[in-house]
Amino acid sequence: MAGNTSGKTAVGTWIGFALIMLWCLFPVAWIISLSFKSEGETAAGSAQFLPKEPTFDNYKAIIDNPDFTRALINSFGISLIATLLSVIFATLAAYAIARLEFKGKRLVLSLALAIAMFPVVALVGPLFDMWTTFGLFNTWPGLVIPYMSFTLPLAIWTLSAFFREIPWEMEQAAQVDGATSWQAFRKVIVPLAAPGVFTAAILTFFFAWNEFVLAISLTSTTSSRTVPAQMSFFVGPDPFNPPYAQLATASVIVTLPVIVIVLLFQRKIVAGLTSGAVKG
Amino acid sequence: MSTAVAPETEKSGKDHRKGSKPVVSDRTSAENRLGLKLVAPAVVLMLLVTAYPMLQALYLSLFRYRLTAPDDRAFVGVDNYLTILSDDQFWLSTGTTVLIMVVTVAVELVIGFAFAMVMHRIVFARGLMRTSILIPYGIITVVSAFAWQFAFSLNNGFVNAWFSWLPWIAEDTNWFGDYWHAMFAIMVSEIWKTTPFMALLLLAGLAQVSEDMLEAAKVDGATWWQRLTKVILPNMRAAIMVAVLFRALDAYRIFDNIFVMTKGAEGTQSISFLTYRQVIEQMQLGLGSAMSVLLFLSVLLLAWLIVKLFRVDLAQARGEG
């Protein structure tokens, strides 16, 4: 009888596995398929899943579209700068939270939590006003600064959970063994802390890459518009026919970095996502 | 809210700086200063972009102020709030937002739990599965919205063609032509993208349920359902509540999907969308600021309600308690 139940569980697990794969990958397959449909096919209406005559025209059109390539550069630039700076500040703060006793520690963690839950839209009005006054409207720093602020909570939370697990005594042990403070830090602590820092960086990058509300509110031209914002304003040549295939193509291109990062670092991302929520 | 969720800093394990209270040693005060110095840049950055603008919004919300007519600015007290609170649009969008939040979080919780169970049990292809489940998580919300908008599209979508055998779907069902159909499409895109996050949080909670306890329940003759409701769920309560809190507050801010899929047509505008419209499209800074303040307060209220109702303890969930 025991064999029977475990057999049933195995079948159930298999079905579950197939369903999860379908859930995760089917919509991705759909936009990929759509990106290979010709403009004529979508204009005439094509309800079938696969393209009738697959074509690369959309990819050529999108890559030749200066607005899109510019948005891609903006997205990469803004996301990378915000990630780098946010992780540096978060590392300092997380080190203090994990290692030191100081007044206001609870306050910092509560503040981070409150900001993680903050309704971003509530800020667009005042930020719009402030940024136009300071000349930050429609610039890279105009997006980098709020992205840093909104990713700091996640980064601090993740990093402090990681740092708490580091056996800091090893630093002293290395010093006892004759290493200088700097050597002990570089040879012992950095390798232990690096995975956490890296994970925080990935999560921060995802946030900035995905952000939409501020991207459409605090920009007005392609000089600083990121891909999600650019895509939402892309109407194509014929206003009555949304450029389905080209938008799908842009979707595929902007999803590629995400897939690459996920393929390379899935283990770290899962560890980072759950570290803040469940035991660190 | 902050007091309810703030992690306890008093840890019994901190031996070397316990002692009797009033004596503040040099070492303690030095550590105090260093700690403050290290967190200062992050705190300043977080406050610069949230607290200061929020205070400004609070101030502006008391004025009649439209960017297109800056000279017409005048102090009106709480008039803006009264205007909003007596407006049907505001309550309709609040209703829509709450509906989206409740339905998506409930569906995600069930599907996410099923996913977590599968991922917990599975012995093969763990890496492949983790990779796949992170794709919807990592994908841009706007892309998810486009993918589903096209899937539900009248001329170019496969949904109508594939599911027209269902009694309520026809070849020519216009998914963006009325409230309920459009809401369904919006919720599908939201649920698709965020279920993986829920599943991963629940998986981490599931990993903390002791196998011994499950085995013991099995030996005692507990059925599958009893093991689920009496052993597994109570033991991962903290993880479930944290997942619900995070997702509910996130769903309450829904904006991207609606902007892309319907632009708020057919009454599908969320509270975030309505605020955006007031501020950015109509340049109503006074009225928009009042809406921002109300939105902020409603998120605080929601967080407080969830924390109180479910007695969420983030500190405990993190194992700091």
Image (tube, rainbow, N blue to C red):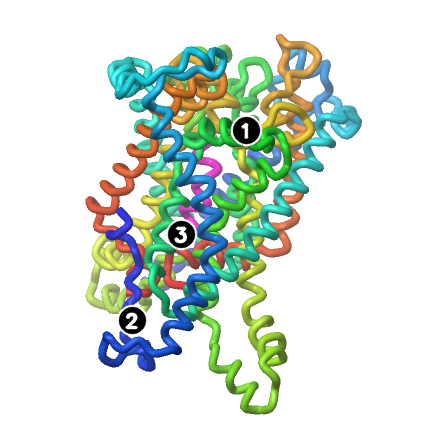
Task: Please give the label number shown on residue A133.
Answer: 1
- Please give left or right for residue B178 compared with residue A198 in the image: left
- Please give left or right for residue A65 compared with residue B210 in the image: right
Same-subunit check for callouts 1 and 2: no
Estimate the x, y position of residue B94 in percent, counting from the top left: 31, 24
- Residue type indicated by callout 3: Leu
Q: Nearer the viewer, residue A4 or B216?
A: B216
| Vertical comparison of A201 with A95: above or below | above
Q: What is the chain letter for disc 3?
A: B
Residue sitting at x 25%, y 81%: B19
Q: Nearer the viewer, residue A266 or B87?
A: B87
Which residue lies under the disc numbered 3? B201
Estimate the x, y position of residue B113 in percent, counting from the top left: 36, 48
Q: Is residue A268 visible?
A: yes
Tag 2–tag 3 contact (CB < 8 Å): no
Estimate the x, y position of residue B131 in percent, counting from the top left: 56, 51
Q: Secondary structure at mark 1?
A: helix
Which portion, as a residue range, is magenta? B190-201
Q: Is residue B169 visible?
A: no
